Image (tube, rainbow, N blue to C red):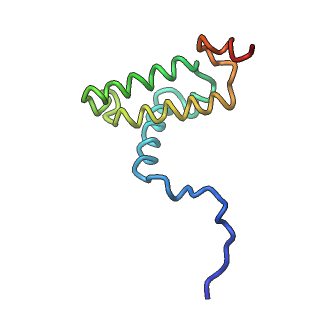
Amino acid sequence: MKGIKFDSDKTQVELLDAEWLEGVGRILTFGAQKYAADNWRNGLSYRRLIGDCFRHTFAFARGETVDSETGESHLLHASCCLMFLYWMTLHKPELNDFYWNDKAND
């Protein structure tokens, strides 16, 4: 006999790729050692984050797969940038410094 668990409506976090999650964890660990744990939660401008994300993505697109400072994939760095940016939109909307932000309030 099997136990019953009513969780079909829950987010299936087990679908996330473990290698990617561990890689993002390594990037966050590097950042915590360089700056401080959760330093990014103090706030970063939206433009800075999207710029960093683009730089890592463009480096990858040019064939530079590994970041020279960390030895980790540029895609993992870009993933962190997107995570940070998403978090900022939820918790630090005042840091939205995109030119179009003033128009959103019209």
Tell me the residue at 65%/59% (across/down): 10
Residue 55, how many percent across, how many down?
39, 22
- Residue at 46% in and 36% down: 79
Say which quadrant the C terminus sits in.
Answer: top right
Percent x, y of residue 46 = 57, 20
In the rendered image of this protein, does residue 48 appear above or below residue 75? above
103 w.r.t. 71: above or below: above
Report the quarter where the N terminus lies: bottom right
Q: Position of residue 70 (x, y in %)?
A: 35, 32
> Relative to residue 82, is residue 74 drawn left or right?
left
Residue sitting at x 47%, y 38%: 29
* Image position, residue 97 (x, y; %): 61, 14
In the displayed orientation, state which residue is furthest to the left: 63
Figure label count: 0
Q: In the figure, residue 57 lies in which quadrant?
A: top left
Residue at image location 65% in from the left, 81% down from the top: 3
Left-right relation of 16 to 8? left
Q: Residue furthest right?
A: 106
